[in-house]
Image (cartoon, helix red, strand yellow):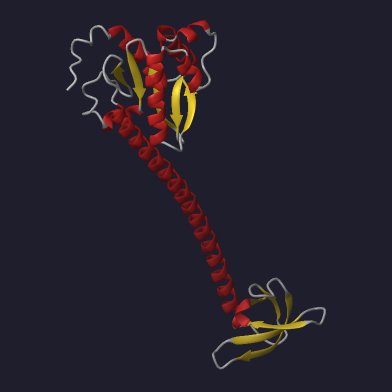
């Protein structure tokens, strides 16, 4: 068990600085980002103190630190990369970040500790293991004069990978389900309208059956000849009870159709 009770007072200033960085990660603004960079860079990175612009790569970020700190940062970088092989490296809020559909984890070097930012869910999931360290809603401090818990970092990163993939999968399914639901609803409404129209047409046709007679003017309202007008000829009833008629058009052309498909005009 690591006893950090004697170190907490001496780390108050750096903890205050990291709080400001952590705050910038959750509520980013240009002002907060520059503040975060100033505290991370100017406090511990001589190269960044001479630079007017923040680093754009993790290599550039790490290169300005003392050798012993560089080794720690590079090892953390490798561990994260191994645990999240599909994640992309980036600089976000002026500190090293791994991205997998979302910001997966961040890390940064301070004067007396390494700041690790696995988002609030990562801290909450491993709160017992992290209880010996100074931690906040989405960050934890690993003192530089104590062994860095690389295995714990690896476990946290793997958790964040799983969490991120599950979230992306759920979002995809949710979006697909929403689209499918909307499409199904739209199709159902369309079919309902078609059904109502078809029923009305059939009712009209049924009402017209009694008026069907040779020579009556009619209009086809359903079937392959829908929309055609003509005169009724040759009314026949099949053994199955279906009534068929021959419709003669004004141009002399004729066709057969079911009586239910026409209305008498």
Q: Is residue 134 above or below residue 211?
A: above
Q: Count of labels shown?
A: 0
Residue 166, position as x, y percentages in the image: 38, 43
Q: From the viewer's perspective, is 101 left or right of 142?
A: right
Residue shown at 35%/10% (left/top)? 111
Residue shown at 17%/17% (left/top)? 3
Give the quarter of the image for residue 14.
top left
Residue shown at 69%/77% (left/top)? 218
Looking at this view, is 159 or 258 the one in front?
A: 159
The answer to whether one can see residue 107 in this image is yes
Q: Is residue 233 above or below residue 43?
A: below
Quarter of the picture holding the N terminus: top left
Residue 4, position as x, y percentages in the image: 20, 15
Residue shown at 40%/41% (left/top)? 165
Q: Is residue 34 above or below residue 86?
A: above
Looking at this view, is 100 or 215 the one in front?
A: 100
């Amino acid at each position: 068990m690591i006893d950090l009770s004697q170190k907490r007072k001496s780390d108050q200033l750096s903890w205050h600085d990291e709080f400001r960085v952590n705050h910038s990660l959750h509520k980013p603004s240009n002002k907060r980002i520059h503040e975060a960079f100033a505290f991370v860079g100017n406090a511990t990175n001589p190269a960044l103190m001479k630079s007017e612009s923040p680093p754009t790569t993790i290599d550039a970020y790490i290169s300005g630190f003392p050798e012993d700190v560089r080794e720690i940062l590079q090892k953390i970088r490798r561990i994260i990369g191994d645990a999240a092989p599909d994640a992309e490296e980036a600089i976000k809020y002026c500190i090293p970040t791994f991205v997998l559909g979302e910001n997966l984890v961040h890390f940064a070097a301070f004067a007396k500790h390494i700041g690790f930012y696995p988002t609030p869910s990562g801290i909450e999931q491993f709160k017992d293991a992290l209880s010996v360290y100074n931690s906040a809603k989405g960050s934890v401090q690993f003192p530089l004069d104590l062994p860095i818990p690389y295995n714990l970092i690896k476990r946290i990163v793997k958790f964040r990978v799983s969490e991120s993939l599950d979230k992306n999968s759920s979002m995809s399914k949710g979006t697909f389900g929403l689209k499918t639901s909307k499409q199904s609803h739209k199709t159902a409404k369309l079919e309902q309208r078609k059904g109502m129209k078809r029923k009305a047409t059939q009712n009209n046709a049924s009402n017209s059956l009694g008026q069907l007679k040779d020579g009556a003017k009619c209009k086809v309202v359903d079937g392959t000849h829908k929309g055609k007008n003509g005169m009724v000829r040759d009314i026949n009833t099949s053994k199955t009870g279906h009534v068929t008629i021959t419709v003669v058009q004004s141009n002399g052309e004729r066709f057969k159709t079911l009586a239910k498909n026409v209305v008498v005009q």
